[in-house]
Image: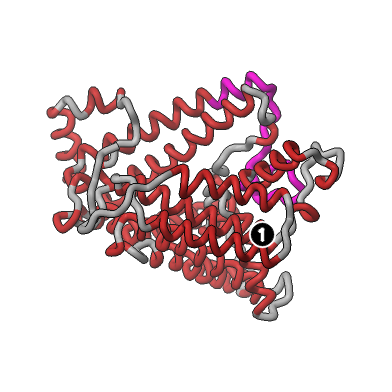
Amino acid sequence: MTKMSVDVEPRPPFSLFIYFLIPQVVITVLVAYRLSLFWRTTAFIAYSANVIFGLSSTTGDAFQDFSMGCSLMIMTFTTIHLLFLTNPEKDFKHESSTEPVQALSVPRRVVWGFSVLCTARNVGWNTEIVNLPPRPTTGRWRFVLNNLFRAAWFFLVIDIGQAYQHSNPMFLLSGPAAVSIKSQGYFRRCIGIVAFQSAAYGLLSLQYSLASAFLVAVGISESKHCPNLFGSWADSYTLRRFWGCTWHQVLRRFMTSCGRYTSGLLGFRPGTSGSSYTQLYVAFGISAIIHSLGGDLMIGSEYLGSSAPFFMSQAVAITFEDLVIAVVQRLGLKVPSKLAHIIGYIWVFVWFSISMPWMLDPYLRAGFGSVELLPVKPLRTYVLQNPILVDRFNAYLST
């Protein structure tokens, strides 16, 4: 990846072993062997201190800093979920389990704890998250082959997205010279947003497809336990459905437990509007914390909070969306489902064209637009090395 430096003062180097791997081992043991509240609290305080030191360090690359900062915060909320808001030993049961956790040998119990920690969507567990994409029904090697083909497709998606980014001078600017993604007009703004986000979507999907293929190929997992990371784009005819069905759900389990806990503290009964909207705002508040206090802060202190307006605005927009739908229903207006879906797709697209710059502009200042995500770039080998094609493409977009 392209190296970028955004720090005025040098920070200590980030250690994957100290700040990420060792804590996961400790959490695994704590999950496998439920200790008293005192020891869990003590362990969490030590873990939190380690996270603070991790966020104060740097990989030397702004994009990797962002990724690791988000990962540290995701692990923090996962730890809260497993140590304080649930009791995995009593609450979690896998569909293939034939004996209680207490009866497992030490090695098997540790493996069980690690499975609980790493199964972000709880696929195959009695706590499986809602709105999960359909489980694969193909055999082992057909699944592996399908995911390798999917990985190749997502590789191409990334290359296409970055081909546009790296041929557009706006994406190559950073720091004080950077300009807003809105600076090139609405049409090019939308193309830029799609290009930037398709690369992010493709990268997550590529990594997941390769990991799933490997885990199933070596027999660690079964194909039925590896549904697609993202849901169907056809489900995105409302903003709520985009976030709840289409976008990845790897954060849902601790968002749900934190939201329910907060709702209970506020005295809202399950199933009420107060409970529903409390959980909605808590979920996007957690997203804001993960990306802002984790990713943004690790890029540099001047970026702290940059992501928050985008994520919190999603909860406000969903509230507005729910209100409009309720008014339409209250008035008894009959809208054909196909027309309603078309209107919904337009609304979701327009909303993201408005709100996405609130998140992307700071990332462009940090230099994310020039980051190289792929070790090789077959498409760009032909596109970017042909100045005639690039000039014609830019001239077409400018018209």
At which x and y percent is residue 73? 49, 57
Q: Is residue 349 left or right of residue 88?
A: left
**Which residue is labeled 1 in the image?**
83
Count how many numbered circles sit on residues in the image.
Answer: 1
Badge 1 amino acid: Leu
**The quadrant where residue 269 appears:** bottom right
Apparent side of residue 90 relative to residue 81 in the rendered image (left or right): right
Residue occupying image coordinates x 15% and y 58%: 176
- Residue furthest to the bottom: 267
Identify which residue, 342 or 247, lies in the foreground.
Answer: 247
Residue at the (50%, 28%) spot, across then down = 150
- Image quadrant in which the N terminus is located: top left
Residue 149 drawn above or below residue 159: above
Q: Position of residue 390 (x, y in %)?
A: 17, 32
Residue 134, magenta (yes or no): yes
Q: What span is in magenta?
A: 120-147
Residue displayed at 54% across by 69% down: 281
